Every structure is written in structure tokens, then in C-alpha cells.
Amino acid sequence: MAQEERMLIVGGERLEGTVRVSGGKNTSVAIIPATILSSTPCVIENLPNIEDVHVSVETLRYLGARVDWDPAEGLMQVDASSINRTDVPLDLCRRMRASSYYIGALLARFGRAQVPLPGGCDIGRRPIDQHIKGMRALGARVDTQRGTVIAEADPLVGADVFLDMATVGGTINVMLAASRAQGTTTIYNAAKEPHIVDLANFLNSMGCRVKGAGTDVIRVRGTQTLASRRPYAVIPDQIETGTLMIAAAATHGDVTITGCIPTHMEALTAKLLEMGAKVYEHDDSIRVRSLGAHRGVTFKTQVYPGFPTDLQQPMSALLCTATGTSTVVENIFESRFRHLAEMERMGARVRIFEQTAVIEGVPMLHGAAVEATDLRAGAALVVAGLMAQGTTEIYNTHFIDRGYENLEQKFASLGARISRVRE
């Protein structure tokens, strides 16, 4: 029987010091499949050493690509010229939501793709109907058979794509497919997240012509031959930055986060300021300092530049000890309050009405045995454990490893009493 791993946190320690944020998970899992589009080897820098990147490496190697990956340096070289198949196995797709991006990349490069529907965290329905709609608009024949998406095109032709919602995954997949299509593709109601801008910059570095990324209209002028010309560094992780900011406030600490992009954090910064924390922004760093009690706040998750759904769970942990009543409305995923049931074990007072959570602040959380149900729920439980009195045991730590690089080491460097044990 495999050993069960759990994270132990002895809470109540004030976080202090400086910590550097890792490369972005969400941008990495989009840019790695995009290397398939290049006729020359690609060098990607600042990749985080996380499970989703490891699954991406396994996927590329399964397809036949030559991959050199140095997790310690965050450096990857991909030579896609040796790819000899266009199907992705179910066992890899089950482990990562972003496996759907291989549909767009393989379709653009080889004119066909066979990819099972993706897995990842169970946080509610995340259909890929908008991905399929976009590829069909470009002339692809797309069918779903027994849970597998089968797409073919000869050729892909640029077109107008009208997304019914501002979906990040759909926007990325259509960008990938359009990158080598004939003519220009215009994506209306496109998502605006920072990792979409980063993908556009990477595609442009290979000779594609992408304009409008970061707005709701993106134009992609396809290029038949894309080639990497220089190393490309992915942007820092917006959600890790936010998690560190929240943890600093939750422990009434004083933490400087370096290597980040403060403008990506404006929605969270506004709420921390409203709660009474101090936030100081510099060119590529953010300092969060909090001494007194926090006030309860209300927020709704929205597409960028609104409050990100991926920070809703860590933020709601902080609100559990804020003075007064806080209200959280989850507008993106319908199953993203499951972590609050675990926090009730720690003394939180929560009521949930459909997509709204009402949190009554308590003076203190208490350590308990809790279970992570998804990636960001795991991060929320870490925040709760850091601020609680006593010892918190977090099970299912593999969820945390999907998106955070060396999270316990980073918190330990700031003074947290945190470790992992196996038994």
C-alpha cells in the first residue's frame, strides 16, 4: 500500500521576510502545448516545478517530442520535429485540465487531434463546447466519441469566432488552432487573463501575428511556418502571488513578495486594503503588512480583471476570522465552496446558499484534520492552518502540488512551522 502523505502546520506564527514567486501555472500549461507549433526547438524559462508541468512533459514525450526538462532551473527545451502521433492517452488527460489545449495545438500543426475530455480538479462543470465551437468555425470537423474529442481539418481557415462566454480555455484553444490557419481569425468576447497575453507574446515570438490580447477582441493572423527564435520566460504566477499576499495578512505578518506583477493583483489588493491590511506596490514586488483586526468584506468572483475564482478559496479562509459578516459570491464554478465544510471543522461559521457563502467571523480558528478537495481548496486550508491555533493536518496534498512549487518551503522561510510527513 502506498504511503499516505499529509501536511502538518503548527499555526499562530507571524510570517515575516521576503519570498520570490514562481513562474505561472496557468501560462505554463498553455505555452508548453504551443511548442508543438514550432518547426525549431523551443527553450522555455521560469517554468514552475509542479505536477501540471510534469504531466505536460509526459504528454509531449508520449507524442514523440524530445524534451529536456530541468525542474531545479525551471528550464525546458522542446523539439517537436519528432512528434509521430496526434492522440493523447486518457491517463494523462485525467490528471490535468489543460490537456484540452493539445486539441488546438495538434490540429494546427498536423490537421488532426484525438484527445479525451480533460480531468483536473473537481470544482464543477467545465465544458469545452466553446473550444469545439471555435474550431468548427475555423473549418474543423469535430466529434466527441465515448468521451474523446476527435478533430480533423484540411485546412484550417481563419474566421470570426463568437464565444458565448469569456472562457479562458476556449480563448486559448482557438488561439492555438488559429496560429497556423490560413488568413485571420477574430475572437470576439475573448477572455483577458494575463496568461492569455503571455501566450500571445509567445506565439508572436515565433512569428505569428496576434493583436488585442488583454482585450475582448483578439485577432490572430495565421502563419504556416512558426519557429522559435529565442528563449521565452513565462510570467510569474498571479495566483501564487495572491495566496502569499493572503497568508501574510492572515498571520498579521509583514511579507515582501518579489518577482511578481503588481498590476495583475489589483482586485485582491483592493479587498485587502478594504479589510485593513497595508499593501505597498513596487515595480516587481508587493509588500503586505497587517497588524490589527480585519474587517469583513463582500466580493464576487469575475473574469479578469475582476476578483479571480482561483483566489476565492484562500480569501474565504482569511475572512473566517474577520470582524463581522462577509459575503462571497462564486460566479465561475458551482462547486467551489467545498473547502468551507473542512474549515467548519476548524471552528469557522459558514452558511451557503447556492452560489453564495455567508461567513461570520470568529475570534480564532483551531487546528484540525482536514482534507483538500482540489488545488485551491488545498491552498485555502494551508492559509487556515497558518492562522489557526494548534496543529492542522491536511490530507490529499497532491492537489496542492498540481499548482504550487515548494509551497511549504516558501512558508517555512517566512517563519511558518510547516512540514510533510508520510506514514
Image (cartoon, rainbow, N blue to C red):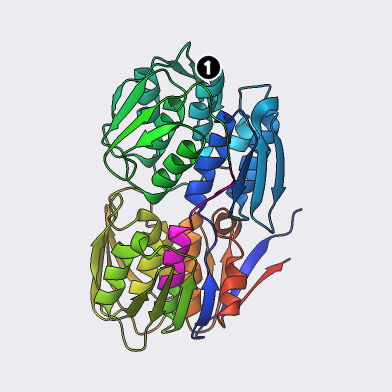
Whether residue 310 sits left or right of residue 411 in the image: it is left
Whether residue 248 sits left or right of residue 405 in the image: it is left
Residue 412 lies in quadrant: bottom right
Query: Is residue 160 visible to the viewer in this orientation of the structure?
Result: yes
**Residue 294, above or below 345:** below
Kind of residue indicated by mark 1? Gly
Whether residue 271 sits left or right of residue 37 in the image: it is left
Q: Residue at x 31, y 86 (%)?
A: 293
Q: Is residue 163 magenta?
A: no
Residue 35 image offset from top left, x and y in percent: 58, 35
Q: Is residue 243 magenta?
A: yes
Residue 378 image offset from top left, x and y in percent: 50, 61
Which residue, as the protein is rendered here, is positioned at the far right? 1
Which residue range is magenta in the image? 230-246
Residue 329 image offset from top left, x and y in percent: 26, 57
Assign a secondary structure to mark 1: loop
Image quarter hosting the C terminus = bottom right
Residue tagged by mark 1? 111
Q: Residue at x 46, y 12 (%)?
A: 155
Q: Nearer the viewer, residue 100 or 147?
A: 100
Which residue, as the protein is rendered here, is positioned at the far bottom? 292
Residue 31 image offset from top left, x and y in percent: 52, 41
